[in-house]
Image: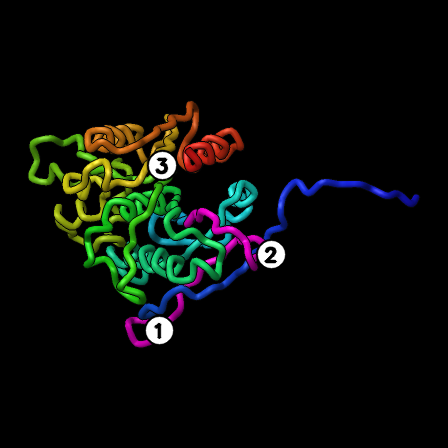
Amino acid sequence: MKETLRLEKEHEVLSLVTGISYCHVPAWYGATMRDLKMDLIVPKHQEGHPACPVIIWICGGAYMVVDKSVWMPEMVYFARHGFVIASIEYRTSNEAQFPVQLTDVKAAIRFLKKHAEEFCIDPGQITVMGESAGGALACLAGVTHKHKEFDIGDYPELDCSVKNVVDFYGPAAVQEPDNAGSADDALPAAGDPVPDWTLDAYLGSGFTEEKYRSCCAETYLDELNGDELPSFMILQGKDDPIVAESVSDRFYNLLVKRGADVEYLLIEGAVHGDDLLYQDVIKERIVKFLNK
């Protein structure tokens, strides 16, 4: 059957660009080097295209594993709503301890700012968004732009400030243990949001209170006022057994106290990484938040 259709273009065509090297880091016990990669979703027709806001997506995995491609199907929703997507890898705790994970994220921010025209990006419209460990790193990236000690690698002349942070159940606040009165009050205890074995790998066995607090975005809020903070959206499952609701509550309250623009969505019945948190109704709220 032959048929002629008259159509209107409902959306532009997108391209997936994989395996872009954004920085070089030590590997194999410091004896070699390797590239860190990102995958991009960009407009297919880039020449003359208006600059787009960009979402930098940070995969979670208890700081121990990361896959820059696994969440790309979920990111297509945001690409269809006008965002360039950059999903990045970073060094995991079996390679190096904190803060290299944060310095890697910041290297990705600077790379995208440097290559903004090439990838149709508006460098003033950068959102960092991540889940679990990636959410914690997104929050850290949002509140540490004054800390030049984390700006390691190429393009040091570019700042790492971002406009928005979207945190999917990331442990961004300090979790106080239940054993109040002990010598280790400020350190996380068994059953706290990030398991002990994960923190030992991430921060080093026998890590100090100072080191623990340095990986919590909460620690850096006191030096920032509302106009120095990006806008924040926090998404938290009410039944999350890994990152407790109280952790996100605490971070939200601290952001409000500092005068930040912040929205906080609690999802009933959702556990850690629950599919409920990635439904279109949630993505629609995120797009509305980022576009306001």
**Figure disc tally:** 3
- The quarter of the picture where residue 22 lies is bottom left
Label pair 2/1, CB-CB below 8 angstroms: no
**In the image, residue 52 above or below residue 104:** above
Q: CA distance from mark 3 to mark 1?
A: 32 Å
Image coordinates for residue 243, horizontal then vertical, percent: 32, 35
**Which mark is in front, 2 or 1?**
2
Q: Is residue 33 magenta?
A: yes
Image coordinates for residue 155, horizontal then vertical, percent: 31, 65
- The quarter of the picture where residue 231 lies is top left
In the image, 135 versus 52, the foreground residue is 52
Label pair 3/1, CB-CB below 8 angstroms: no
Magenta part of the chain: 28-56
Q: Can the viewer see residue 38?
A: yes
Q: Secondary structure at mark 1?
A: strand
Quarter that holds the C terminus: top left
Q: Secondary structure at mark 3?
A: loop
In the image, 257 versus 168, the foreground residue is 257
Neighbours of disc 3 within 10 Å: few (<14), some (14-19), many (20+) = many
- Identity, as a three-letter code, of the amino acid under mark 1: Met
Residue for badge 3: 169
Query: What residue is drawn where x is 43% and y is 47%?
Result: 55
The first of marks 3 and 2 along the sequence is 2
Residue for badge 2: 45
Q: Is residue 268 magenta?
A: no
Quarter that holds the N terminus: top right
Image coordinates for residue 75, horizontal then vertical, percent: 51, 45
- Identity, as a three-letter code, of the amino acid under mark 3: Tyr
In this rendering, would 63 be left or right of 189? right
Query: What residue is drawn where x is 38% and y is 32%?
Result: 235
Q: CA distance from mark 3 to mark 2?
A: 35 Å
Residue for badge 1: 33
